[in-house]
Amino acid sequence: MKNNTSKIKTIKRVLAPVVRLAPRLKPRLKPLNDIREAYQGNTGQWTSTGNDPQFSCEFPIFDLHTGWYMITLDIESSNVFDVAKFYIDQGKGYLEEESIEVPYQSRKTAKRIVRFDRKAHGIRFDPHSSPGEFTVRKFLMSPVTFKFAEARMLRKLMRWCPSKHEDTVAGTREMLKQQAENTGQGYQVVLECHYSALFSAPQRSHNYNQWIEKNEAAILPSKEELTAIGSENSKPLISVIMPTYNTDVGWLNEAIESVINQSYTNWQLCISDDGSSSTDTVDAIKHWSKTDNRIRTVFSEGGAGIASNTNSALALANGDYCVFFDHDDILADNALFEVATNVVQQPDLKLIYSDEDKVDSSGERIDPHFKPDWNPDLLLSQNYICHLVALKRSVIKQVGGLRTGFEGAQDHDLLLRVMEVVRADEVKHIAKVLYHWRMTPESTAATAQAKSYSTDSGIAAVRDYLSRVNSAATVSQGKYPNTYQVSWGLPDVVPKVSIIIPTRDRLDILSQCIGSVLQRTDYPDYEIIVVDNESVEPATHEYFEQLKAQGNIKILKYDGVFNYSAINNFAVGHASGDVITMMNNDIEVINEGWLREMVSHAVRSDVGCVGAKLLYKNNMVQHAGVILGIGGVAGHAHKYFDAESAGYFSRLHLTQNLSAVTAACLTVEKKIYQQAGGFNESHLKVAFNDVDFCLRVGALNLRNVWSPYALLYHHESVSRGHEDTQEKKTRFNSEASYMQQQWGELLNSDPAYNRNLTLVREDFSLAA
């Protein structure tokens, strides 16, 4: 890449309006060029239909002192859901990494607690994350006491309120105070950190500009690498496919220039215009076709639609591979080089995709999407692949090109059909940002609402795929636009499930666990196997006798030192079910369909282990799958996120393939458990046995699945406590060492994660 800065050149720019807030916070508007705006009396309403979402607001120093404040915001917006941003100048200017985000829904009041460590010199206020129309109906910044702020933040952190409201607030406070004590931080700092995590998108939580400067120069090809791809006769020809229609000529020129400036030169650009009425667009295309003989063009009368127009561009192509390219986006300078290099190294590749980011209205590169490797279940839940996509041209012909009737999700439909004819080893993910997706008012890069019809088309595409693979599964819209929930259903003969729960006394949590299973499980055929590891309390044994009367519960006695792996292997040998569910005794069921959901995946022929979404009692995430390499061996994805937050690119609410899931609640077919050899009771008696087991199941060419639709509480380590004795620490270190020796290479490159994301935290933030 010739320019490693974080700015992408843009042709059209519009100045932002300036709002200066007087001491009583009443705005005075100063109209600037090409912006229509109105201040409506004393109602505090600001209206803009401009192309730049920014306001600059300045407060006198004496108005905003140090302390706690509550932001109250009410915006009527053309984007149904959006995020407002506040940049507080506390002496260092307006810093992106210190911005305050307030997600909101149009015409609904949004609030957020913030703290200022120093007096504020000014505030910049961006009501929109993308261009559009908006009216600020209310904007208040009110000073509050810490007592008020604490109460509000704690209530936010326990969003799903269990029966004992006060106990839950107190429990959340105690947990945070304990964490503050353990880490040496102040309680207020820890509280604010967890609270703020509910609002900030993790991909924005670190300075992406600095990351670009530090990392992207290192991936640029050298002259030697450029000439080493192959001989002139063996270099693959890459056809770049670009459909156009009334494209902004500035953006079109920049898109075409990004192809011409590619470091790899054996390409052709195939442009099909769908009857543009803009003479500027047509003239620009004709101009470029005359300046470079690698640019091929075709013009139609119009009205064909995006799928047919793309097929027209494909008809011009004679390359070995086709790269799909939107008419207003930008290719990284080394994009085609990376594709060609991988093709030369692996000639059998059929699908190649890369990471991507977005370009905002000012040309700033933002929101990098660092994707996992091939992830079929995630692709059914969301078109996570999106850009950059390179497909072998023969494969495109094999599946019939793009189809009409799926406009808005025509690319997703194509990928789902390709998924039927490619093997996992024929797919390559390049973990580099090779595509810059421009945010425009019409693009889904700016807001999914800009193409609301795309969700309906996506549902239709997934439904069609499921019908083609002879599945009885159904699909519905997911929690967010352009996300989908696939319900696989159960076979006609429902398999019996054996739920295995090891325990040693702790009647309080065990009875809660079993009671929740019995009361909140709608699965028709299951047994509970309680494995008693030397319980001594009379009340526990009395409870065991009561359980035996249930009919579908049996008690197994296991004597000896606690060995989680051995206990579960022992219990599986006594299980009568065809499906095994391992469950800790500190689990509490939340939703009745949890077991149906897990079994529906476990009985799929290509699936191994299935994991659930586990929450702390205060409704922060305890487990959303396991990420290899975090902390040296493995950590939990999205730990301490709010249960309702989207997570990294909505992944907290999407079914997906992960390398491992926790055995605190894990479902697997009994035959697979036995085929994989069960848990390792020699080297992994307590820790990491579930991770090791999942990796061995994966080695059987089976995919592990995590589902957000099986929802349970996990009162983690209530029964056994923490690794806080020298004996426990020694055992833990030994088990960690075994995992690193056994799986070291895989631990360093989790295919369900991305090497550009951190292994220090569990929040999907950028690697240092």
Image (cartoon, helix red, strand yellow):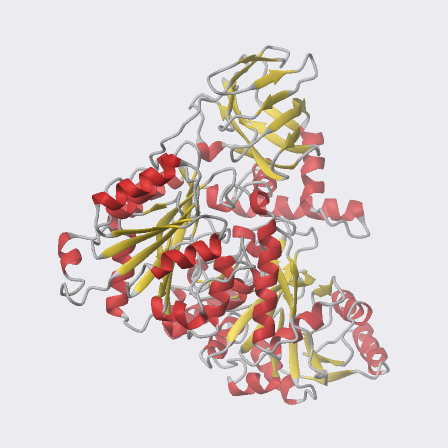
Residue found at x 24% / y 67%: 344
- Please determine whether, in this image, residue 536 is positioned above or below residue 303: below
Residue 222 visible within the image:
yes
Residue found at x 64% / y 25%: 136
- Give the image location of residue 459, x and y in percent: 61, 60
- Please determine whether, in this image, residue 763 is positioned above or below residue 103: below
For residue 481, side relative to residue 320 (left or right)? right
- Please determine whether, in this image, residue 680 is positioned above or below residue 29: below
Residue 640 visible within the image:
no
Depth order, front residue of 219/232: 232
Residue found at x 69% / y 62%: 712
Depth order, front residue of 135/570: 135
For residue 634, side relative to residue 295 (left or right)? right
Depth order, front residue of 753/447: 447
Quarter that holds the N terminus? top left
- Give the image location of residue 735, x and y in percent: 46, 71
Residue found at x 44% / y 65%: 401
For residue 541, side relative to residue 599 (left or right)? right
**Which corner quadrant of the image does residue 150 belong to?**
top right
Total marks shown come to 0
- Give the image location of residue 639, x and y in percent: 56, 54
For residue 451, side relative to residue 6 (left or right)? right
- Give the image location of residue 135, x and y in percent: 63, 26
Q: Which residue reaches farthest front?
A: 301
Depth order, front residue of 679/341: 341
